[in-house]
Image: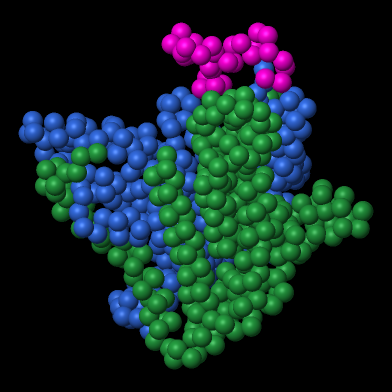
Amino acid sequence: MDSFNGDKVAGLSPVPNVAAEAASFAPPSLRDCRTESPFIQYTLIILAWFFFLGILGIPILYLFTQAFSVGISLFFQSIFADKDTLNSIFLTLTIAPLAVLLNTVFGLNAAWLLTRYRFPGRTLILTLIDLPFAVSPVVTGLCLVILAGSRTWVGYWLDRLGIPFLNNTPSMVMGTMFVTLPIIVRELIPVLEEIGPEQELAATSLGANGTQMFLRITLPNIAIGLLYGVLLCNARAIGEFASVAVVSGRIAGATETMPLRVERLFQEYKSPADFALASLLALMAFGTLLAKGLIENRLNYRHHSVKKGKMGQ
Amino acid sequence: MNRLAPKVLPGFGITLGFTLTYLGFLVLLPLGALLFQALSNNPFDFFRSAFHPRALSAYWNSFSMAFSAAVLNTFIGLLIAWVLVRYRFFGRRFMDAVIDLPFALPTSVAGFVYSTLYSERGWLGEFLGQNGIHLTHTWFLTVLVLLFTGFPFVVRTVQPVLEELDGDLEEAAAILGANRFQTFIHVIMPSILPALITGFSLAFARGLGEYGSIVFVSSNLPYRSETGPVLIVSRLEENAINDASAAAIVMLMASFGMLLLINTLQKRRQSNG
């Protein structure tokens, strides 16, 4: 590893470079003082592969084998011939983009507010944004059920105005929004902090208004980070299960998203169809990973929330 | 970072207003409704449903499963992060890229795959069944699926800390006569311990609230294998909203405690580093 290279101070240090000398004439025990013996290395590598394959590899391989062993035609048939499954795909493709879009607008607003100004109550807002990470999605669903129930004035007015909420798309979007709320903000805050306000200050001092400054300076600067956050948020929104399960009423063909449909098919023992739908979701997840890898490698983007240990749950 | 007074850059009013409104509607209103529901009841009733024997056993099930999985995840995650950072081997980049899959994969898919894989007709279930081991609906299988959902948290929090570790310290330890094991325990471990604890708490918090995968692999029997989130859902299905919200408040308190712990640890880590 580069950082382990001891040669960089060789010319300056009065003390002879230890690593270089060790390599030339010291006993072998000193030569490899910063790593383990090959035996231990291989043991650890094999153990890591064992856990990696056991926990992740075999289950995923099993999923794809079962899904595609019935043949490609039956795979497509079990997805596209089932009206309820098709409906669940449509519903997921409606709910996830809606939730991601709203959270993107919020993420831009909140990240701008929290990085460009210092004001009383700033920490409180940060805490509120992190809150959904600590709340079990089941509790989120329960909160929404209570909120829309007959005991609160929100429920009263929803009922009075005839707005459909529970057992319908709005509550499912709201549950998904709640669960995915912190992801984009947490991705944007470090990016905005790192860039700093200098360019934006220059733009405003040269007479740009807020919209011009945002569109020409801020947005291009944070575009990759924003894309990254949207990607993670979208993956999480597609997979959201618990909160949506609680608020949707799980009406087949009407309020079932793809993850809910997976469970329904499981309970009905519709095995090939279930594997097909589950593998479709897994393919989407792999698509997310691929796009993530491209952003990290090609665009040299360093993922921020991972470093902080705040990866979207 | 210089501290700007509001109004130097445009948009303070608009973004503050929007952020507060959004948070108010999306976060405060629903959580407020839950608190309102719980507090509007007789406190005696609240405590009776919050500490009902069935609820107590559900908290215990959640706690024991999430804790066991998080402990195992800490070891597995450290091992994988260590191998990814320190060694070069065939398939390293592939492993590094696919580690994130549990973050991107819906938990219901994970639960579904695990329950079929370990059922009598699945690859591993069939193999284990021939040897007299039946994992379907066991405590062990639930912990196993929590390993899947939790181990990337540990890998991804420990990995960057390991990457930035100063190799000179290890060299110094070796020169002073420490063997590799002593170096690991006395030199490397103290620097990665905060990250390990953070990863552990993230995996643990995740396990406490997990529902999507557990509902597939567990038998979900009251008193025996029912977890907190599963209890809340079944109380809701029984139309016992007061019981459900009492349990939800207890679960919320537990996860707030976790969040507080994680934040304190991260602050300490930042001030140390």
Residue at 50% x, 90% y is: B45
Q: Is residue A178 visible?
A: no
Q: Quadrant of the N terminus of chain B?
A: top left
Q: Where is residue B110 drawn, in percent x and y?
A: 65, 52
Viewer-side residue, A48 vs A286 = A48
Which chain is assigned blue?
A
Residue at 51% x, 47% y is: B194
A215 relative to A242 in the view: left or right: left
Q: Where is residue A179 drawn, in percent x and y?
A: 45, 58
The quarter of the picture where residue B223 lies is bottom right
Asked if residue B119 is positioned above or below residue B4 in the image, the reply reads below
Q: Quadrant of the C terminus of chain B?
A: top left
Viewer-side residue, A177 vs B227 = B227
Count of marks overlaid on the render: 0
Residue at 50% x, 31% y is: B164
The quarter of the picture where residue A260 lies is bottom right
Q: Where is residue A206 drawn, in percent x and y?
A: 8, 30
Asked if residue B38 is positioned above or below residue A109 in the image, the reply reads below
Viewer-side residue, A188 vs B122 = A188
Q: Where is residue B144 drawn, in percent x and y?
A: 71, 54
The quarter of the picture where residue B65 lies is bottom right
Give the magenta part as a residue range.
A1-30
Q: Is residue A52 visible?
A: yes
Viewer-side residue, A304 vs A248 = A304
**The colour assigned to chain B within the rendered structure:** green
